[in-house]
Each structure stands twice: as C-alpha cells, then as structure tokens.
Amino acid sequence: MKKIFLLPFFLFTLLNLKAQFPAASQTQRQIIVGTENTALVLSVGKNQKLYQVYLGEKLKDPADYLSLPNLHEAYIPSGTDNLFEPAIKILHNDGNPSLELLVADEKTTRDGNLITTSILLKDSKYPVEVRLNFVAFQKENIIKTWTEIRHQEKNPVLLTKYASSMIHLDAYKYWLTQFHGDWAKEMRMEESQLTSGIKTIDSKLGTRANMYQTPVFFLSKNIPSTETSGEVIAGTLGWTGSFQMSFELDNSNSLRMISGINPFASEYHLKPYETFTTPEFLFTFSNTGKGQASRNFHRWARNYGVMDGNGNRLSLLNNWEATFFDFDEPKLTELFGGAKNLGVDLFLLDDGWFGNKYPRSNDRAGLGDWQETQTKLPHGLGYLVEQAEAKGVKFGIWIEPEMVNPKSELYEKHPDWVLKLPNRDEHYYRNQLVLDLCNPEVQEFVYKLVDDMLTKNPKIAFIKWDCNRMMTNTYSPYLKDQQSHVQIEYVRSFYRVMDRLRTKYPKLPIMLCSGGGGRTDYGALKYFTEFWPSDNTDPYERVFIQWGYSYFFPSITSCNHITSWGKQSLKYKTDVAMMGKMGYDIRVNEMTPDELKFSQQAIQIHNRLRDLIWKGELYRLVSPYDEERAVLMYANEDKSKALIFSYALHPRTFNQFSPVKLLGLDANKKYKIEEINKMPGVNSWFAAEGKTFSGDYLLKIGLSLPNNSDLTSAVIEITEEK
Ligand code: DGJ
C-alpha cells in the first residue's frame, strides 16, 4: 500500500531534481585539489563544464569521488542559465551580457609542500578566458584560490562581478560565524543559522578591509561547530580594501559562498589582453571544529602568509598613550631610559614628530609634511636614533604616508594629489584626506618618504604604518574617466609601493595599523610582520578582541600593549598582553618599585616563552562568550611544554569556575605545573602549584585554575618531567 502512495512522490522528486539541475552532466574526468586531510573535488562534465562535487575530509580512495553527481557548476557565470548569484558578470563589446565557461585546459604541478592546479575555462562564443588557480598547502591543510580573467575582444569588456572564489556546500543546516565591530570594538563574534536567500558580509571602505565587518568567517555544516567538534570551513580574503562575501541558500538547500573584491562602485573596464587578477581567497576545512581550523591558519600564516612569520619580534615601549602629541627631545630621551629600564628591545615614537609650517601638535595639522618639527626635535630623527642607542634600545617610528591634512604644506603644493570629488565639499574623517595613491607620483612620494628616512637613518629598526581613514566622496583626479577603478587601483598601488619597499628592505619589521585594527588581512600581511589589533587596550575588552583575532591570525602577529586603559591590575594587563607580541604604552616612571620589578620579570618570562606563544599550537579552552572567563593554552609540537592563560572577566560569584580539561598534551607524559608571572611577594592560590600530573589526568580531569575572582588572571607553565 505504502509503495503506491510513495511512487507519485518519488516521480515528482525526480522530475523536480531534473528541473533544478538541467545541466547536470556525466563526468568525463575529475580534478582533485587536495591537502593532507582535505579534498576539493572538481569534475569536468561531458558538456565540458566544470563542477564542484565535493569539499571535505579526504577519502582514502579517489575513485569514490566518481560516484558524486555534477550538481554545482564550479564558477558560475551570469547571463546564461544561472538563476542565483553568479561568480562572474561580464558585458561584451557587442552589448551581450552572457558568459559560458567550458574547460579548455588544466595543469597540476607539485613543488614540495605545494600542489598548484590551474584550470583554464573559455567561452565558446567570445574570446574570453577565466583561469581558476588553486594552491593546496599539504601540511597546513590550507587552500589558496584566485581567478584570472582575460579577453581578446576589440575593446574593453565591462566586468561587474569577479569573484576570487565560489564554493558550494550541501548540508542540512548552515551556521555562519562572522566578526563585526567598529573603532575600539574590533572582532565581535556572532554566530547565526543561515536562512534561505543571501547573507552578505562586506565593507566599502576602500583603504582598508576591516572596520565594521572583518573579511573572515566560519561556516559550520549541520550543527554549530565547537572548538573541538563539527565540520567547519574557515575562510578569509587577502585584500586590503572593500570586500564582499556572500552566502546564498537556494531552493534545494544548497549553499554557494562567493568571496572577492566588493564589486560596489567598482565596475572594471578590462582592456584586451590585460589580465584581471583577483585577490587570493584562503580557506581550510576541519572536521574537528574551529580549533583545528585556526591552527591550520596559524601554521600557514607563519610559513607563508606573514612577513618573517617564523622569525623574531621586538618588544617595545610606545609613547602614544603616554604622551600623545605632547613631547620634545628631553621627554623622549627620558622615555628611552624607561624602555631600557623595563628591558624592552625598542622605543617606538608615535604620531606628532613632524610638520613645521603646520606642526603636528594635534590631529588637525601637519599630516603629509614628513620633516621633523624643529621646535620639538631640533636635532632631528638621527639624534633620537643615537640617543636611543646610547641608552641601549633600538628606535622605531610611526608614519601614515597615505594621508594628508588639508592644513599641510603637502596639500598646498599638491591639491590634486587627494581623493576628492571635484564639485563637492571635501569630506574629512579625523581631519584628514586620503592621498590619490593611484597616481604614480603619489606612489613615488610614499616610497621616497620611507626610503629617504631609512637611507638617512639606517638604524631605524621598526616602522608603525598607520592609515586612519576610509574613502568617502571618492574621486581620483589621476584616473579621470575611470572612476570605477579607484578602489581597486588604490589597493594595487599600495601593494606596488610595498613590493618596492620590501625589495629594498626585506627584513625591517613593520607594524600594520589602521586607526586600530582596520588592516588585518593576508593581502597586506605579506609585507608586514605584525598588526595593531585595536586602539582599545582595556584588557577586559582585549581578551575578547584578541580571542576574535586568534581564530585567523597567529599570536606572533598581534601587538598587545600594556597601557593605562582600564582599571585592572598591572598583572592582569600584562597577562593579557603576553598572549601575543608584548609591548608597553605606559609611563614607566610612574610605576611603583614592585610594578617595575614585576614588569622587568614579565619581559624576561615572555622572552623565555615567546617561541611557545608565537609558534606553539593554540587551544582555546574556555570562551569568554560562554563563561565569565577566558582560558587559552599554547602547547609545543612535541608536547613537552605548554602555557595556560586564564582571565576571569566579571564572575558573579567567587569560585564559580569548574576545572578545565587541557588539550595538546601527551597522555603518556608527566607534567609539572607552576604558576608564573606573579606580583612580587604574592603567593599562589593554586592548589596544583608545583605538583606533577599525568597528561592523561590533565586531559581527562583537568585543572582548577587559581583565578576565581573578578578580573584576576593567571599564567600557568606546564613542563614535561622526564
Ligand atoms: C591610530 C592608531 O591606532 C594609534 O595607535 C596611534 O598610532 C594613532 N593613530 C596616532 O595618530
């Protein structure tokens, strides 16, 4: 009986499937983009179209992928049979808006850890080519993908969409974790179930990717992934400008994720034979939750994504919050002494050292005039470098080379070097304007400013590169009738300048900063050794902000400074800053003897353990989003050493926290537990202090951590006992 009832339903489903996938074609051959654990399987149909048939855990036998149907065209063009969001949209010379992409060629090469696959797609009617590129980083389980678009039509074609990547997923439910914020509120994590239709996260800021939305996401399949469970894809775009990531859930509950430059205000007139190369989209897959996905990114970033990712970093004392614009030579040389006394490697002179006709004594003037202010620094930068050296610390300097105050000599001399609409009022943000970096003369100006400074002062050991505003009233006097290229050309020009600088100065550490954490992307981090996560240095807030960044960026990139923000103890501030690249922005001479002694010791402890923090495996044990505390742990690869950072946030009751099971240890090893980084004379409350436990115990039962009351913190060192 039942069978009779089911038959019409079955037939209906079949017909319906056929209607949804009219182009489903039999497989001719498959192309596997695989890392050690992950496979992205593409298939060439008998109709020559390219399909994505799988993304997930690698199967043992590649022949098994042949059973998968060709349901999703891999990189869907617009204007033919596509009914949802396309990856690419083009307008041909004859006004025809269609594109059909057929596989013309493919190539896979191996170079050690890297397998590169390149698939050439061609239109059958128009001389348009789209090349999909994939690099699979075997050990790191990261796939990097980008697209190249080219044509040989007579005149430029118009590109109105040009995704770096399109990925298809099939699951029961989809959970998107995104990171949003604002100035001083970076990386707020939010997770939601995707519903039908399109969810877009994007930015339209031009000079930076990040401010309100960050170009990173997690996409969990079926159920929300945790730190240790669930199938999850983590993705990010390497582009220091406007981005767009869209997640479209269609009528058959399939998801397409499209990532790339934001096409907003950016129609691109692609000339014949010119190649439009999209930024790189990076992603990883984990079937054991977000923790593994992060560790994949960390390892990849250190090995490939960040300048000198496995190198050293300099601890520093910055003067921004200690002095703001109010300093002179004697004040600075005194601060050098403070840096030495603390035991940091470098003193970083921040904003306010330049401008003469319009001295930079606040943020309303002087930006663009990169000459030392005579009244403040009569002996120039060279003298400061020498004085710092005499005190035993290196010297670093802040610049913001892409920007200008209207009250500056630069603006007076080159009013046409600024992005601004010709027929509207100038629009200021932090009293400044963006230079028209699309103009090669401006690129030369930026390059020369840095090059001249470093040529004159070769001992400058560090640069903080700031960028304090986004684009508004955008118009490039240089690009004239190609205004829709400004956002793209700006970022390309930024990279061009950085390429030149890095050719000449390959080793110099440079911090990436953008009015807080506006520039934290792997497009820029190729050129930079570290980034400034946020102007918000209140350690309570920082626990959340650093937690957020830790999903995608290794701790070696995160500049964490101890400042006077927040009412927490110096110990708490220090414990929070230690979880990355440690620095100070504080008046050392106002420290009590105990605070100074504690800080000197903290720097030594950090120096001793920094390799573990920067290059170890990160395990996020307790989330500040789940409990009124955060607990993180770093363990080295051979599981002989680990470090726990534990921060109570605002627990409502004393002793409310349960023991924390550790991760990343060897069950068969024995470990000694010690609380470190304590204030002088303070005894440990820690029941486990000095005791030895088996790895098995620590993994299965865990530790009751000593910091149970409001805004207390603890750092626990775990050492294998042989
Ligand atoms: C914004 C940065 O985020 C701060 O750290 C500081 O360098 C100021 N700019 C200086 O103007």
Image: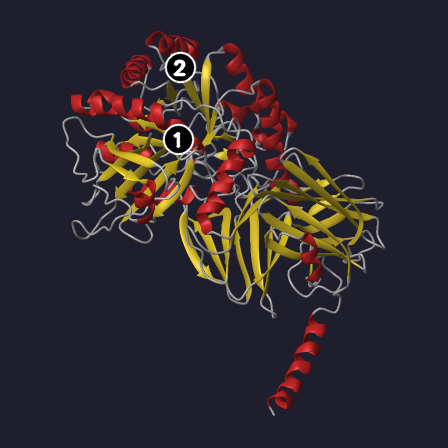
Relative image position of residue 374 (x, y in whole percent) = 40, 13
Q: Nearer the viewer, residue 630 or 535?
A: 630
In the drawing, does residue 105 fall left or right of residue 351? right
Residue position for label 2: 394
| Quarter of the figure that contains the C terminus | top left
Whole-number angstrom distance, CA of label 2 to CA of label 1: 24 Å
Q: Is residue 623 visible?
A: yes
Question: Three-letter amino acid code at disc 2?
Answer: Lys
Ligand 1 near label 2 (Cβ, under 8 Å)?
no
Name the residue at 31% across, 29% down.
321
Instruction: Answer above or below: position of 681 versus 421.
Output: above
The crowding category of the residue bearing disc 1, from other C-alpha atoms within 10 Å (few below 14, some 14 to 19, many at least 20), is: some
Q: Say what amino acid the circle numbered 1 marks.
A: Leu
Q: What numbered label is drawn on residue 392?
A: none
Residue hosting label 1: 612
Q: Nearer the viewer, residue 668 or 546?
A: 668
Assess disc 2: are there few (<14), some (14-19) or many (≥20) residues with their C-alpha within 10 Å of its C-alpha.
many
Q: Is residue 633 left or right of residue 221?
A: left
- Find residue 323 and report its horizontal and vertical position in percent: 30, 25
Q: Residue at x 64, y 90 (%)?
A: 4
